[in-house]
Amino acid sequence: MKETKCEHCGFWTNGKLDNCNYCGKRLNDRHLNEIEERESIELKGLPLLKVPEEAPFYTKGFLYVLRFIQLIFLSIISMVAAMASSTVH
Ligand SMILES: [Zn+2]
């Protein structure tokens, strides 16, 4: 039986359960929250700059250039992250 240590009360409980046998709180809460958070970020798409419609053309141009740089930067970061995680696992 796989045992999991409860984050909330510190007791070891059945890892197959969703909730702790002792305090009833959700097991692996932090881990699950992290996954949910990551999924919600992915659903929202890339955190790119917003270009306001009413902005003057030079501001728009500047923002589009910034957004382009941001996009390249993000793709480099995700590439590095993918490489880092592939070496860890
Ligand atoms: Zn507990």
Image (cartoon, rainbow, N blue to C red):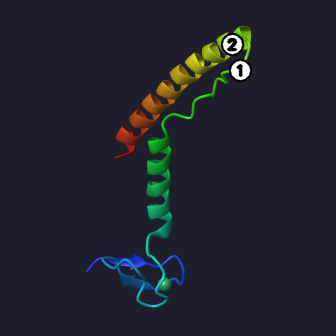
Q: Is residue 75 above or below residue 45?
A: above
Residue drawn at (66%, 21%), measured in percent from left and top?
53
SS for tag 1?
loop
Q: Is residue 71 above or below residue 31?
A: above
Q: Quadrant of the N terminus?
A: bottom left
Per the model, the C-alpha gap separating discs 1 and 2 is 14 Å
For residue 6, side relative to residue 57 (left or right): left
Residue drawn at (47%, 26%), measured in percent from left and top?
75
Report crowding for label 2: few under 14, some 14 to 19, many 20 or more residues within 10 A (C-alpha): few
Badge 1 vs badge 2, beta-carbon distance below 8 Å: no
The kind of residue on which mark 2 rests is Phe
Q: How many labels does the image show?
A: 2
Report crowding for label 1: few under 14, some 14 to 19, many 20 or more residues within 10 A (C-alpha): few
Q: Mark 2 points at which residue?
A: 62
Q: Where is residue 27 in the image (x, y as percent from the top left)?
A: 43, 75
Disc nearest the viewer among 1 and 2: 1
Q: Earlier in the sequence, mark 1 or mark 2?
A: 1
Q: Which mark is residue 12?
A: none
Q: Position of residue 71 (x, y in %)?
A: 53, 23
Q: Is residue 84 above or below residue 34?
A: above
Foreground residue, 23 or 68? 68
The kind of residue on which mark 1 rests is Glu
SS for tag 2?
helix
Residue drawn at (51%, 30%), measured in percent from left and top?
77
Q: Mark 1 points at which residue?
A: 54
Foreground residue, 19 or 55? 55
Residue drawn at (46%, 32%), measured in percent from left and top?
78
Based on the displayed image, in which of its 4 quarters is residue 63 positioned?
Answer: top right
Looking at this view, name the residue that lies furthest to the bottom: 22
